[in-house]
Image: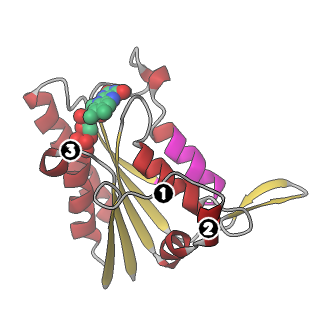
Amino acid sequence: MTTLHIDSSINGDTSASRAISRSIVDRFRGDRIIYRDLVAEPLPHLTLEAFADGSVLDEFLAADTVVIGAPMYNFTLPSQLKAWLDRILIAGETFAYGPEGPKGLASGKRVIVALSRGGLYSQGSPAAALEHTETYLQAVFGFIGIVPEFVVAEGVAVGPDQRAQAIDAATGVIERLAA
Ligand SMILES: Cc1cc2nc3c(=O)[nH]c(=O)nc-3n(C[C@H](O)[C@H](O)[C@H](O)COP(=O)(O)O)c2cc1C
């Protein structure tokens, strides 16, 4: 079983999403782990020429489990992660348009997202409408036939206690997903 592990936080060793994605990979360890750090080795913005290189897509298609560290930056994803998504949402490969509308072609793999947010955006909170990280990832993976699972640490910028509590809660969610 191959696990593709992706990180996209610019915060290095202090990153919450990197710590959580690492814990998920440690817990779900397959025989083979492929690691892609989108900050250490960024993918360029999408160009027409980039479509000719299917290596990022092939790596995604070959994985049984994909673990993604996804921090909220400016209410959405880091652009590094968007550049990666631009290479896996490919018509005819991961989705197709047919007479009944779009159809996801990438089902059968497990996608687990380690998501960290500085503020509080859960349903019912005043800032919920500004949440475009979890909702966007839910939509794009849904579009290609995958229901992603989320391990969320939120409020990590509220203060050290809230950060510790959020990361503890995320660890509990990882245990439940692994059970
Ligand atoms: C460039 C940047 C933009 C951010 N934008 C937001 C934001 O829009 N909303 C928010 O709640 N937190 C925001 N934060 C805080 C991060 O979501 C929070 O620190 C989170 O832990 C980042 O994950 P990381 O530690 O893995 O990098 C931002 C942080 C950075 C560095």
Q: Which residue is mark 1?
A: 84
Hey, what amino acid is under mark 1? Trp
Which amino acid, mark 3? Asn
Q: Is residue 88 above or below residue 32?
A: above
Residue 65 visible somewhere in the drawing: yes
Residue furthest toward the right?
A: 99
The residue carrying pointer 1 sits among few (fewer than 14), some (14 to 19) or many (20 or more) residues within 10 Å by Cα, namely many
- Magenta stretch: give its range: 136-148
Which residue lies most toward the left here? 160
Residue 172 visible in the shown view: no
Task: Identify the residue at image location x=49%, y=21%.
Answer: 129
**Front residue (pair 73, 44):** 44
Examine the structure image and report whether residue 141 is included in the region drawn in magenta: yes
- Mark 3 crowd level (few <14, some 14–19, many ≥20, 10 Å Cα): few
> Which amino acid, mark 2?
Ala
Instruction: For marks 1 and 2, give the CA distance.
Output: 16 Å
